[in-house]
Image (cartoon, grey):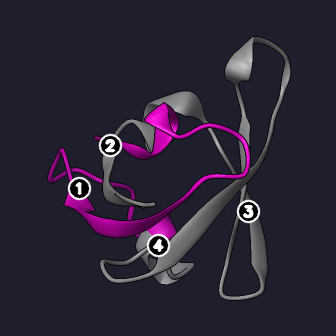
Amino acid sequence: MNLSNLKKGEKGIIKGYKNEDFPIRLLELGIIPGIEVEILFFSIFYDPIYIIYEQTFLVLRQKEAKNILIEPII
């Protein structure tokens, strides 16, 4: 499952990345394995996605969110 599969208000834990060419800038911003993320809001046409993790708000494009593998928190 990837981050773009979550619905608004759902949470998940980052498990890894689908592609090895994942943008370094997202790693530098703290999008690393083991971090809990929550979907706050989807923009029109579901792109971009607004997330929160460790008291940080971030906007991701759909193609970036699809590269982030997560385990949903139930």
Residue under numbered circle 1:
17
Indicate which disc, 2 or 1, sits on the residue closer to the N terminus. Answer: 1
Under circle 1, the secondary element is strand
Where are the magenta residues, as a range? 1-26
Q: Is residue 19 above or below residue 45?
A: below
Q: Amino acid at mark 1?
A: Tyr
Residue under numbered circle 4:
31
Whether the magenta-drawn stretch holds residue 8 is answered as yes
| 73 with respect to 67 (left or right) | right
Q: Amino acid at mark 3?
A: Leu
Circle 3/circle 4 CB separation < 8 Å: yes
Measured from the top left, where is residue 7 in percent x and y?
Answer: 62, 37
Circle 2/circle 1 CB separation < 8 Å: yes
Check disc 4: other Cα within 10 Å, few if <14, some if 14-19, many if 20+: some
Residue at position x 46%, y 30% from top? 63
Under circle 3, the secondary element is strand
| 21 with respect to 29 (left or right) | left
